[in-house]
Image (cartoon, grey):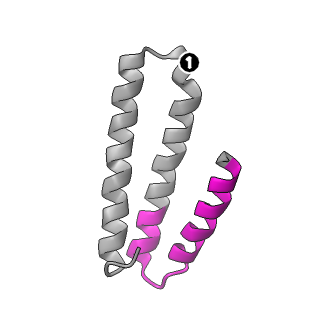
Amino acid sequence: MRRARALFLGSVAAVARASSDPRVAALEREKDSIETQIDALRRQKAGMDSTVYQKSLETLLIQLAEKNKAIRDAAGGRP
């Protein structure tokens, strides 16, 4: 499932980065970085205090949502 998600999202991100708007491309790279951080955090979950994990995950998911909104706004509202 993770591999399928990565392949699908990778192709979507590649299309967005192919945009002629460098702002959108930069935002997509930042979004990719946040997604990488989320994946890393999930791999570390077993060795973490649950409260610290939940707070860290919440922070990253909020950042991801904000980045997605910024991408939509910069792309003129296109998903």
x, y percentage for residue 26?
44, 67
At horizontal 32% and vertical 81% (from top left) the residue drawn is: 76
Task: Report how many numbered discs are placed on residues in the image.
Answer: 1
Q: Residue furthest front?
A: 1
Mark 1: few/some/many CA within 10 Å (<14, 14-19, 20+): few
Q: Look at the picture and state if 7 lies above or below 11.
A: above
Q: Amino acid at mark 1?
A: Ala
| Quadrant in which the C terminus appears | bottom left
Taking 8 as reference, is 54 left or right?
A: left
Taking 26 as reference, is 14 left or right?
A: right
* Residue span colored magenta: 3-28
x, y percentage for residue 74?
32, 75
SS of the residue under disc 1: helix
Q: Look at the picture and state if 75 lies above or below 30.
A: below
x, y percentage for residue 19?
49, 82
At horizontal 56% and vertical 25% (from top left) the residue drawn is: 44
In the image, is residue 9 part of the stretch drawn in magenta? yes
x, y percentage for residue 33?
49, 50
At horizontal 67% and vertical 47% (from top left) the residue drawn is: 1
Q: Look at the picture and state if 6 lies above or below 27.
A: above
In the image, is residue 19 part of the stretch drawn in magenta? yes
At horizontal 42% and vertical 81% (from top left) the residue drawn is: 21
Task: Read off the residue under disc 1.
Answer: 46
Taking 72 as reference, is 3 left or right?
A: right
User: Hey, which quadrant is residue 71 in on the image?
Assistant: bottom left
Q: Look at the picture and state if 72 lies above or below 61.
A: below
- What secondary structure predominates along the stretch shown in magenta? helix
